[in-house]
Image: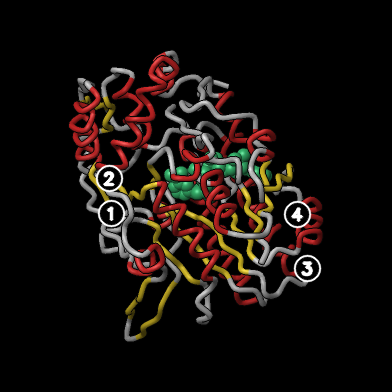
Amino acid sequence: MSVLLTGADGYIGWPTALRLANQRDERIICVDNFARREWVEESGSVSATQIEDPRERFEAVDNLSLVEGDLADRDFVLQLLDTYEPETVLHAAAQPSAPYSSINGERALYTQQNNVSMTLNLLHGLDECGLDDTHFIETTTTGIYGAPEFPIPEGGVEVDRQGGNDDLPFPNMGGSWYHVTKSFDAANMRLADSEFEFPISEIRTAIVYGTETGETQAHDSPTRFDFDYYFGTVVNRFCAQAVAGYPITVYGKGEQRKPMVSLEDTVESLVRLVEEGHSGDDGIDIYNQVTRPVAIVELAETIAEVGEEFDLDTEVKHYENPRNEDEEHKMEMENDAFLDLVGGQRQELEAGIRDVLGTLVEERDRIAAHEDRFLPGVLTDD
Ligand SMILES: NC(=O)c1ccc[n+]([C@@H]2O[C@H](COP(=O)([O-])OP(=O)(O)OC[C@H]3O[C@@H](n4cnc5c(N)ncnc54)[C@H](O)[C@@H]3O)[C@@H](O)[C@H]2O)c1
């Protein structure tokens, strides 16, 4: 059974490619255009981990084949699907940064064109190539739920209104130009599910934290790890700040809870979904890929506490919130289907932070040399 993995050079893509290669006999077709490497360079930052040239790192692993190309290009996607006829497409390519998409209209347009085009090209491509049994999986984001004042369901929401009752899809409250691309993708997948034959699963990914997995260690080939304002997600950026001796920057009160998941739980659930396939039930299988919501201030304090094991003396500082959000939002989220898929949480937050700090203390100089990238600035005025 052949697997096509998009975004394979990315933070989640690379460890997922390695685990798939480890567990499966056939070659994994890995697609990327290395755009993430360019965005981070453009923002004046670097990956804290020193990642190899993409062509070299894919070549070094048996079972991985790299195809370079732009998935926003429809002809490329049609040719790709026609050539490899994958039985599973795991689509993890995206411009995934909310702050990057919010810099200006040009980046908002790029993000929306890039992300929405890729999904549309893949969905229509599967149909046009007659790949009716292929399982299409996409990582969207828990951010498409927004921050409602009720426990977030895993998928749709039941609505009672004026005597009527129905299940409505619930992907419509994205809080950035990037998040809205995933709302679009969710809506497009829903339409594709009713128009085309192939099964679809949507994994709504929370904020991912972590560095190594067993496979990145075994291959001595880390995944990228960004810590700058645009591409460093909150746990990873805070850990880098702690290692550089820079105060951890909490926006506002920091009592708002955010959904989180470790890289290990993320990779394992994706690989299991590839193995197990679609449930066979009607409609899209939807998973909230989250283990638990964590308050930002709790996160900062946990990092400061675990940091003491690495002789870090971390100050937690509150800054005026540049985001428009409720600073006390509770964020409750159902995740039964996800926990079932992954077989129970594999890594707790504290253990994940310990791993990250352990990796980052080895790269302290590299991070410290770019510590001005923790805050916005460099990309705002062009
Ligand atoms: N990391 C997180 O915390 C997080 C949270 C929620 C959702 N997600 C989702 O998970 C997926 C993977 O995220 P990530 O953190 O690994 O991001 P990433 O940027 O590290 O990886 C995405 C990869 O896609 C590639 N790509 C982008 N546009 C492309 C195009 N047009 N053609 C070919 N390749 C292209 C990039 O070069 C990059 O290597 C994305 O769908 C993202 O939205 C991630």
Determine whether label 1 and label 3 are within 8 Å by CB. no
Q: Is residue 152 above or below residue 63?
A: below
Q: Is residue 276 above or below residue 247?
A: below
Q: Quadrant of ligand 1?
A: top right
Which residue occupies 63% across, 50% down? 6
Q: CA distance from mark 3 to mark 4?
A: 11 Å
Question: Closer to us: mark 1 or mark 3?
Answer: 1
Of callouts 3 and 4, the N-terminal one: 4
In the rendered image, which residue does mark 4 sit on?
77
Q: Which mark is residue 128?
A: 3
In the rendered image, which residue does mark 1 sit on?
292
Of callouts 1 and 2, the N-terminal one: 1
Which residue occupies 36% across, 85% down? 164
Of callouts 2 and 4, the N-terminal one: 4
Q: CA distance from mark 2 to mark 4?
A: 38 Å
Neighbourhood count class around disc 3 (C-alpha, 10 Å): few under 14, some 14–19, many 20 upward: some
Q: In the drawing, does residue 322 fall left or right of residue 106? A: left
Q: In the drawing, does residue 307 fall left or right of residue 220? A: left
Determine whether label 3 and label 4 are within 8 Å by CB. no
Q: Looking at the image, which is closer to me, 326 or 207?
A: 207
Q: Which mark is residue 349?
A: 2
Q: Is residue 11 above or below residue 375?
A: below
Label 3 SS: helix
Neighbourhood count class around disc 2 (C-alpha, 10 Å): few under 14, some 14–19, many 20 upward: many
Q: CA distance from mark 1 to mark 3?
A: 39 Å
- Quadrant (top left, top right, bottom left, bottom right) of the N terminus: bottom right
